[in-house]
Image (spheres, rainbow, N blue to C red):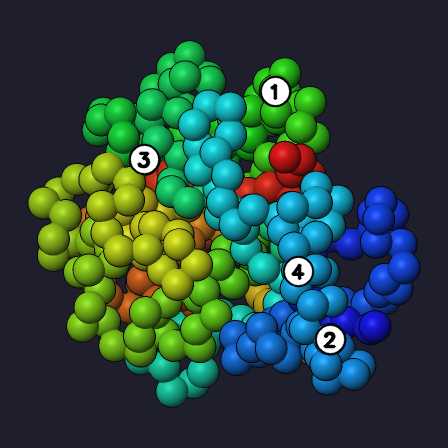
Amino acid sequence: MHFKFPDYLTVSPVPFPGIAQLKIDYTLVPRSKTEVSESDLFESSEGVTDVRALVLVMVLFSISPVFGQQPKEFTNNIGMKLVLIPAGTFTMGSSKEERGRHSAETQHEVTVSTPFYLGKYEVTQNEYEKLMGNNPSSIKWPTSPVETLRWKDAVSFCEKLSELPEEKAAGREYRLPTEAEWEFSCRGGSETAYGFADSSELLHEHAWFAENAQNKHHPVGEKKPNRWGLHDMHGNVWEWCKDWYGDYPSGALTDPQGPSQGSERVIRGGSWPVAAETHFRSAYRANYVPTDSSVVLGFRVALNASNRKP
């Protein structure tokens, strides 16, 4: 039988004792569109006439460490939760009709070719201090996002986290997300101005901003998550990205890394003192000098799914 499976599954031709008589081959199908159903993906060349074989294959995928799907969420050695972000293609930037758009948000097609993990929350002060031995934050609270740190401080955190014995043994190499990965994750499969809707009417349910933050950032995860389970992608603190800031290239791109050089790094998401609702849109871009720090600027970590071992 020939089956089609989602491309986020890890498949390897390993033998299973006692079922050698069952011949199975497969095709990996890109799952970039949210409307693709499980029945479309798990379809055999014979119309799934042998339900027992299909069930067997699905069981093998669920119990085998080789055939198994990457977990949708995991917790690392210092207690940080990371969420699996699927591969996919999306329209980055904003349409000319989107309220509050800027000229730097030119729409273009971007493909994120492989799944990756992204922090479920912004890195907290407690997590940062546990690893780095200090808390640079201006407004101190253990479960609030760490802030007042430079771009290289965020990078150093990722590098040191990767060097922990347990993380290193698991092959995990942490980093900052690219700008494209950040927007893809913020959108969570949506094409609206915000990850939850085109209107900012429900922004207070998803974000801390000037109208509700009471002049401070707040503990992570208190607002509703987006469709992919990520909290505070809108508001609370701005987040450092890996890229230098620059104009978007023209045409479709795959796994863009941003300009090769520049003077400022990309920051995304908006923050607690910002009043303009349009600054919290998924496509909104901002930039900051990497050697500077701010009470309104933190980060979250990313990890290639291929680097993550059970």
- Which residue is depicted at the point 63% across and 35% down? 310
Q: Amino acid at mark 1?
A: Glu
Q: CA distance from mark 1 to mark 3?
A: 24 Å
Q: CA distance from mark 3 to mark 2?
A: 52 Å
Which mark, by number, is residue 58? 4
Q: Secondary structure at mark 2?
A: loop
> Looking at the image, is mark 3 or mark 2 earlier in the sequence?
2
- Disc number lying in front (3 or 4): 4
- Disc number lying in front (1 or 4): 4
Q: Locate the N terminus and report the quarter of the image it occupies.
A: bottom right
The one of 80 and 145 positioned closer to us in this rendering: 80
Q: Amino acid at mark 3?
A: Pro
Q: Amino acid at mark 4?
A: Met
Asked if 267 appears above or below 254 in the picture, the reply is: above
- Which residue is depicted at the point 56% across and 46% down? 71
Q: Secondary structure at mark 3?
A: loop
Judge from the rendering whether residue 193 lies leftward or rightward of residue 29; answer left or right.
left
